[in-house]
Amino acid sequence: MQPIELVERLNAIAPPDYGMGQEHPPIDDLVEALIQAFRSASTDQRKVVGDELNTAARNLLLNYAWERAVEAVRQESPKAVADGLIALCIDDGGFDLRDSIVRMAVLFRSAEKLGLDAVSLFHEAADVAVNPAFKDAIRAFPSRPPEHGI
């Protein structure tokens, strides 16, 4: 399935008034398929994906990234950290970059707890980001001084 078709499905199942932290419909399989398609998509296809996401779908992706950080530690799963980062790249900081940065912090901490190479994980994710400002933010996140907080 093409990435845009997956985004259309995500937009369709996202409750119109969905906000972060609320219970959401089952989305894991759909978002995992979108992540896989997004990774192999062209830059132009990735841009279209970001342009077509509605607000509720963006909130679902941000929530998904947070959930992957938690699950990464529970299941000792490096893949969950990587998937959370790609979910952020799909949103591409389009909702609010600050919300993405909060999720980056949680994913970074999960990567640390698992003893992963966070710099490599964040750089690999940045390679699929479209928005130059978001690409820079995700690439630079692991080297932020601790006193800068999130």
Image: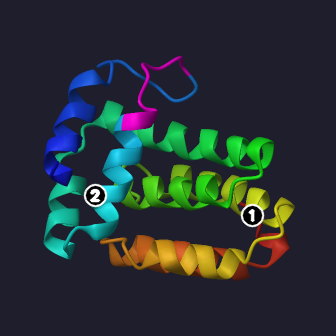
Q: Is residue 133 left or right of residue 9?
A: right
Mark 2 or 1 closer to N-term?
2
Quadrant position of residue 14: top left
Question: Where residue 129 sits in the image (x, y, percent)?
Answer: 37, 71
User: Residue at image x 53%, y 37%?
Assistant: 63
Question: Where residue 66 sits in the image (x, y, percent)?
Answer: 61, 43
Element marked by disc 1: helix
Out of 79 and 18, give the one closest to the viewer. 79
Q: Residues within 10 Å of mark 1 (few under 14, many from 20)?
A: many
Mark seen at residue 111: 1
User: Residue at image x 22%, y 42%?
Assistant: 6
Out of 123 and 101, give the one closest to the viewer. 123
Out of 58 and 83, give the one closest to the viewer. 83
Q: Is residue 25 magenta?
A: yes
Q: Can residue 137 be seen here?
A: no
Which residue type does callout 1 highlight?
A: Ala
- Secondary structure character of the magenta stretch overall: loop
User: Residue at image x 76%, y 70%?
Assistant: 148
Quadrant position of residue 122: bottom right
Q: Is residue 70 left or right of residue 136?
A: right
User: Residue at image x 78%, y 59%?
Assistant: 109
Give the vertical position of 131 relative to 56 (above or below): below
Mark seen at residue 143: none
* Total numbered labels placed on residues in the image: 2
Question: Where residue 136 sits in the image (x, y, percent)?
Answer: 48, 80
Q: Which residues are magenta?
A: 22-29
Q: Is residue 81 left or right of residue 88?
A: right
Element marked by disc 2: helix
Which residue type does callout 2 highlight?
A: Ala
In the rendered image, which quarter contains the C terminus? bottom right
Q: Is residue 90 magenta?
A: no
Mark seen at residue 37: 2
